[in-house]
Image (cartoon, rainbow, N blue to C red):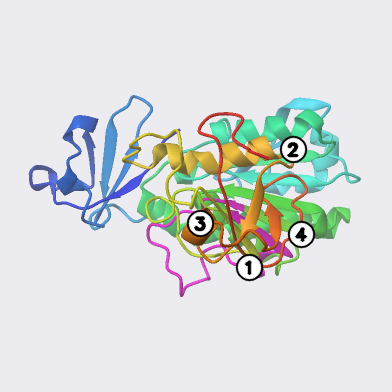
Amino acid sequence: MKYFVILFAVFAATSAKSVTVLKSVEITDELIKNPRYLLFERDDGLIQVEDLETAENNTLLSVSNSQVVFYVYTPNNLSGTKIRANQATNIVSLTGFSLQKETVVIIHGWNNHYLSPVNVQIRKALLQKKNLNVIVVDWSSIAGGTYISSQGSVRAVGNHVGDFLITLNNALGYRLNRITLVGHSLGAHVSGNAGARTIGLVNTIVGLDPAGPLFTESNINNRLDPTDANYVHVIHTNDGLLGFGINMGHSDYYPNGGSTQPGCGIDLAGTCAHSRAYIYYAESINNNHFLSRRCDSYTNFRNSLCNLTPTGRLGYFPVARSAQSGQYYLQTNSASPFARG
């Protein structure tokens, strides 16, 4: 899986290029101080740097059936079946999708695809013990481009996913309130836009460390916010770097403070911490052990000043709605199993 981090310096030797590949040893302190640059770690360990001022912006206003596809999994179809949005009315006969079961839709982020760890781990955890439909959205044909174009296209991709879900409702009578959207990074904002397309009628959205770069607090038209579903549950693990450090849900969970995660070491690029959001969520699906406490800050939580405040549970399926609105804190272990109970 590839990840990104904001950099802060000017590459004089490569300023004419929008994308530059560096070795990790070339990432100095000076490269961590200019929001013009975005960095992510490639599968080969090299660091790809994107210049957000010169990168090509191929923002899409709409997407086609070939650009966004859907993989449908069920307890009787663990290998999955690929369909397109224009095949939604035939989803039952083509894939074994059950109109009687709940559905979880998983949406990946930038530079991912349907077989990326975020999709595989969550899908396997869901189908291990839950009797439901799982749909994995693959928008890698768009998410594989520059970050700036991928970020700019989340609304169009979300609208396409939302229209697919509306077709299930209108043509097959499959109610939108039986659907949970789970999105990681840019996928969290795609989920928000998909939910908004349904006028917030989907049951739940789980936002896993929603992406931060190029999003703003004031503009909710292209990002996740509480109006996008009946209930929005957000897990923050890398706020201020790869994640967006604001409350975006009815309940927002901040494991270990929400910025860095134990066991991740220095984690300069935020690679480890950013991925912990979906790792924690996948672990939580079949247990309810991520006990959290509502608090106004992680400092007060660590100083035991919130020991009498309401509790909540990070993740799980279905997400518990008993938690009062607000921000919740918890500590995790540094390795699996991460939940402390």
Most extreme residue toward the left is 13
Q: Is residue 16 above or below residue 305?
A: above
Task: Assign a secondary structure to mark 3.
Answer: loop
Q: Is residue 233 magenta?
A: yes
Q: Residue at x 75, y 65 (%)?
A: 201
Report how far apart the C-alphas of labels 2 and 1 lie in the structure. 25 Å
Give the quarter of the image for residue 126: top right
**Which residue occupies the foreground of this view, 283 or 221?**
283
Tell me the residue that label 4 is attached to: 321
Q: Residue at x 53, y 29 (%)?
A: 335
Tell me the mark number nearer the camera, choosing from 3 and 1: 3
Q: Amino acid at mark 4?
A: Arg
Tell me the residue that label 3 is attached to: 303
Residue 225 position within the rendered picture, expressed as x and y whole percent measured from the top left: 58, 66
In the picture, the disc for residue 287 is 2
Q: Is residue 89 magenta?
A: no
Q: Amino acid at mark 1?
A: Pro
In the picture, the disc for residue 226 is 1
Report how far apart the C-alphas of labels 3 and 4 lie in the structure. 27 Å
Of the numbered discs 3 and 1, the one sitting upstream in the chain is 1
Q: Amino acid at mark 3?
A: Asn
Of the numbered discs 2 and 4, the one sitting upstream in the chain is 2
Residue 238 position within the rendered picture, expressed as x and y whole percent measured from the top left: 44, 49
Badge count = 4
Q: Amino acid at mark 2?
A: Asn
- State which region is magenta: 207-234
Of the numbered discs 2 and 3, the one sitting upstream in the chain is 2
Relative side of 4 to 205, left or right: left
Other residues around mark 1 within 10 Å, as few (<14) / some (14–19) / many (≥20): many
Q: Quadrant of the N terminus?
A: top left
Q: Is residue 114 above or below residue 325?
A: above
Report how far apart the C-alphas of labels 3 and 1 lie in the structure. 30 Å
